[in-house]
Image: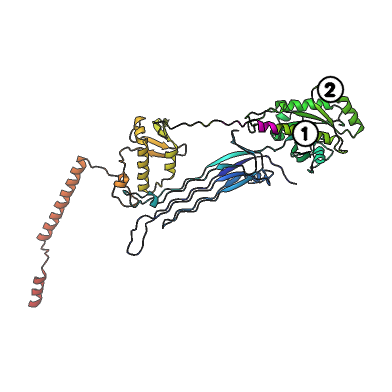
Amino acid sequence: MATFVDRVVLHVSGGTGGHGCVSVHREKFKPLGGPDGGNGGNGGDVILRVDHQTTTLLDYHHAPHRHATNGGPGMGDWRDGKNGETLVLPVPDGTVVKSPDGEVLADLVGEGAEFVAAAGGQGGLGNAALSSPKRKAPGFALLGIPGESRDIVLELKSIADIALVGFPSAGKSSLIAAMSAARPKIADYPFTTLVPNLGVVQAGDTRFTIADVPGLIEGASEGRGLGHDFLRHVERCAALVHVLDCATLEADRNPIADLEVIEAELDKYAVDMSYAGADGEVVPLNQRPRLVVLNKVDMQDGRDMAEFVRPELEQRGYRVFEVSAVTREGLRELGFAMAEIVEAARESVKAAPPKVKPAVLRPRAVNETGFTIRREEKGLQPLFRVRGDKPERWVKQTDFTNDEAVGYLADRLARLGVEEKLFKSGAKPGDTVVIGGEDGVVFDWEPTMVGGAELLASPRGMDARLEEFVRPTRAQKREEYQERKDAKAAARAELEAERKAGIWTESYGEQSGDDDDH
């Protein structure tokens, strides 16, 4: 049996961008032809798209982790890496995307409606893109950035014009089967319907959709029965139809009491802002147009009960219809009454202009730097945390095993004004500086580094500013001088001892003369 799932928690992550390439062009008679490393490809996005052929969220219930493909790395000869493929996840029409905190991120209604659930990471630049007239042959490239990763909640709210509400075994599924081509499961025991059923009804020139809400009982709005799980499917409906069982065999139930219980549950249910009308307002369930259906009048007890309660219901202001799903009595009149309400709702949507929020342009302030620095305390020691889109992105792009890449990061941060603001915030050399959140990169701040790495004549992949150079003290110089004097004195003493011992080095001519005498 197929399982219906209308709420899932989905873990999505975009693809990671590819790393840039470090390469130098080489050809015959031209061994150093300049940098030719290509850029890394961008990671793929994760996109939710409405597809009419998808009717449930079951696939995401079984496989809640979805990840887009990564971008390819750059290559030599100016070849860029391949972009990651976009992962399109089909969702049913009427899916609401929320954050784990309940914030509505998107309301996907209509074929083809899309929402980018997780953006892919940006690919890193190769050394060819990083070259400049002053830095002709960079020995580094930028790394790819990881894609966005987050958890989202998908809730399915059925797209229906009319909602049938009522107690279990009131005959809602039988009405849908009699009025449309839908064939839901029908049995003579409570809670037969475990999932919302949809059916399309044609009344004259009007075509509309009806749905039932299974399992509504007293306390449903507080979690009893099945109604609490499926009341969200009523939120998009233009009108409600109360289906009352006039032939129930339970002695403590009657149509009036059933109606009051269901009305009380609808009053308690709070409609969220996941769906609003054209004016941007949400109409509570108890304020929407309602019809009352007295079902099962084909039975003698049912007809007697319907005739008994009908005057009181009409006195309360309800439009009442006596119907039978078995003999189809009263279904035509009920269908046209539903169509009348649906047409009125559709006309009001067309007449009411959509409520569009005016665009607010907020120009960037003159003194806005794009980052913030907050002083914290860690282990009774000062800690300065730098937060901002650019600094955090630049840190992710830096290969900290390459001195030249680290120097390039220092130049970028200096041009952005991070070092100057650290001075104003009271930072001192040796203080801890963190760029990012809890998983940010930690530095021991040394403000003596001078910007302009492209002007330094250092080998590729190295930055002379990062080389450790300790200036010797006067005492160290005196000690080194004394060591050199002692070494010279020892060498002279050794030569003098050899001379006194008669150890001499004879010339080549003297050795030849001695040989002739013999």
User: Is residue 369 inside the magenta stretch?
Assistant: no
**In front: mark 2 or mark 1?**
1
Quarter of the image with the C terminus in it: bottom left
Q: In the rendered view, does 55 fall on the left or right side of 307?
A: left
| Residue appearing at x 65%, y 30% in the figure | 352
| Rendered location of residue 225, percent (x, y) | 75, 33
Image disc number at residue 338: 1
For mark 2, what is the residue?
Answer: 312
Query: Within 10 angstroms of label 2, few (less than 14), some, or many (20 or more) residues?
Result: few
Q: In the rendered view, does 254 fall on the left or right side of 469?
A: right
Mark pair 2, 1: CA separation: 22 Å
| Residue appearing at x 59%, y 45% in the figure | 65
Q: Are marks 2 and 1 in contact (CB under 8 Å)?
A: no
Q: Secondary structure at mark 2?
A: helix
- For residue 162, what is the image quadrant? top right
| Rendered location of residue 219, percent (x, y) | 74, 28
Identity of the amino acid at label 1? Met
Point out the tag, 2 or 1, that comes first from the N-terminus. Answer: 2
User: In front: 247, or 294?
Assistant: 294
The magenta segment:
346-357
- For residue 116, what is the image quadrant? top right
**Looking at the image, is 253 positioned above or below residue 9?**
above
User: In front: 468, or 6?
Assistant: 6
| Residue appearing at x 83%, y 34% in the figure | 333
